[in-house]
Amino acid sequence: MVETRSNMLALGTRAPEFQLPDINGRMVGLADFAGAPAVLVIFMCNHCPYVIHVREKLVELAKEYQSRGVAVVAINSNDVENYPDDSPEKMKQDAEKFGYTFDYLFDETQQVARAYLAACTPDFFLFDAECKLIYRGQMDDSRPGSEIPVTGADLCAAMDAVLQGQTVATEQKPSMGCNIKWKS
């Protein structure tokens, strides 16, 4: 397992547009989340131990913050030829099995991951109502094999701040996880 850090895209960057199929083949784009007070874009996959480690809490937090108006979307950009556990069919199975309430999209060309400078899974990008990046970093300090519980503290603090009209702290720790499985 190769641990990779987030690239920490510059705060204030406008969210790159995308138009990707969800697990049912429906096209979903950034414009579909217009009007939300915040949009959380998560780069994740099915097989990564880091994603598996936070998945239960991530599903819980997504439900909570979606009920408060935050739009949540997850994108899988992994090379499925070499990593078949991340195929769209397996994405659909995981979404149903774990109760994803958010759109789970497949970035077959990997162009969306490149546009966001996504580097690892999970990699979190939180945008304000104007689609400007206000948080990119870790969910919390927990890692697979650590004694630190998964709380989502860092990500929740950022979402709480934007929902309360406050400034999100600019000191942010990069997300860590498995590298995105790029096509050769």
Image (cartoon, rainbow, N blue to C red):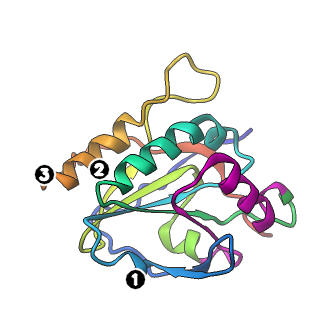
Instruction: Identify the magenta region.
Output: 85-111
- Would you name the residue on which mark 1 appears? 31
The kind of secondary structure element at disc 1 is: helix
Give the labeled residue for mark 2.
159
Q: Nearer the viewer, residue 92 or 81?
A: 92
Magenta includes 109? yes
Q: Label 2 sits on what residue type?
A: Met
Residue 131 placement (x, y as % from top left): 30, 73
Q: As displayed, is residue 31 above or below residue 3?
A: below
State the SS at label 3: loop
- Comparing 182 with 39, the one in front is 39
In 3D space, how far apart are the residues under numbered discs 2 and 1 (Cα atoms)?
Answer: 20 Å
| Quadrant that contains the N terminus | top right
Kindly check if marks 2 and 1 are in contact, taking CB atoms under 8 A apart as contact.
Answer: no
Residue 125, image x, y percentages? 41, 58
Q: Quadrant of residue 36?
A: bottom left
For the point 52% across and 53% down, the residue is 123
In this rendering, position of residue 30 left or right of residue 79: left
**Rendered location of residue 184, percent (x, y):** 80, 70
Tag of residue 98: none
**Is label 2 in contact with label 3 (beta carbons under 8 Å)?**
no
Q: Which residue is mark 3?
A: 166
Q: Report, in whole angstroms, how far the alpha carbon at label 3 lies from the one at label 1.
A: 24 Å
Nearer-N-terminus badge (3/1): 1
**Residue appearing at x 32%, y 70% in the figure:** 13
Q: Residue at x 50, y 20 (%)?
A: 148
Estimate how packed mark 1 is, as few (under 14), some (14 to 19) or many (20 or more) residues with alpha carbons within 10 Å: few
Q: Is residue 65 above or below residue 9?
A: above
